[in-house]
Image (cartoon, rainbow, N blue to C red):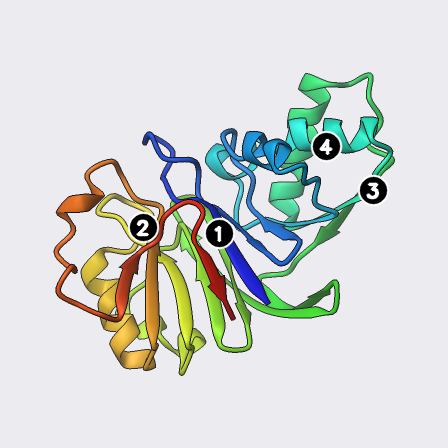
Amino acid sequence: MMVKILGTGNAFTKYRNTSIMIDDILIDCGPSVYTILFKMNIIPENVLLTHGHGDHILGLPMLILKAYFSNLHMNIYAQPYVIERIKGIWENSYPEVSLDLVSFIPLKDSGIVKVNNIVFNYESRKHLHMTSLIYRIGYFVYATDVEETENDWEFYKDAKIVIHEFGNGAGHTPIETVLKIKDKANIDKLYLIHYQDDIIRLPIMNRDDVFIAKPGDVINI
């Protein structure tokens, strides 16, 4: 499988909103993400969402609209509260356009979901006033917008590659904690995402097992 990093920034940076594709499966679609998909001539059939904040879902209306006029079906996997948010946004944006070509698949707080023959294990984490899902495929884990402590390392145990957010504000995991999780879980390679414009100041440049993810990066898993 191949992971393509579409965006790496948080909600307030010059970088495209954090989003990845695993083969042809999209995870998250903020308002700056759909444009790159259109340039790549990609309309994903399957979209997984981590949580309900705008920098992770507000690109979906344009993506759904494009799929509608292309007569393409789309599956959206998300927690129930996220699904309701998307439907509300749609009703206030394009009430005259049917959602008949969209299937919403609700996800629980934790479990297993199979998408295009790829099996995802997932768990929820607290993120401000909501929850955010983290996804694992075998030895690969993707986590963004989570409030974790070093005691949350077990989901990452023995992972070869982890793409993980970090931040100093409420609702996020400080870089020091992310590094403790990495070491406790015996993670081989850690890629950092969801960062601000001053990412170059991050003091991890002397490590050869921690990387700053960049838009366009491709990782084989």
Q: Position of residue 79 (x, y in %)?
A: 62, 51
Give whichever of discs 3 and 4 has the lower sequence position. Answer: 4
Q: Nearer the viewer, mark 2 or mark 3?
A: 3
Identify the mark nearer the N-term, 1 or 3: 3
Residue 41 falls left or right of residue 7? right
Residue 172's mark?
A: 2
Mark 4 / mark 2, whichever is N-terminal: 4
Alpha carbon of mark 1 to alpha carbon of mark 2: how far? 12 Å
Nearer the observer: mark 1 or 2; the answer is 2
Asked if the residues shown at circle 1 and circle 2 are in contact, with their CB atoms under 8 angstroms apart, the answer is no
Q: Is 45 situated above or below 142? A: above
Whole-angstrom CA distance, mark 4 to mark 2, is 29 Å
Residue at disc 3, secondary structure: loop
The residue wearing badge 4 is 64
Q: Residue at x 65, y 34 (%)?
A: 86
> Hey, which quadrant is residue 15 in on the image?
top left
Residue drawn 44% across and 75% down?
155
Residue holding disc 1: 131
Mark 1 residue element = strand
Residue 78, image x and y in percent? 64, 50
Q: Is residue 18 above or below residue 100?
A: below
The N terminus appears in which quarter of the rendering?
bottom right
In the displayed structure image, the side of residue 170 where residue 117 appears, left or right:
right
Residue type, label 2:
His
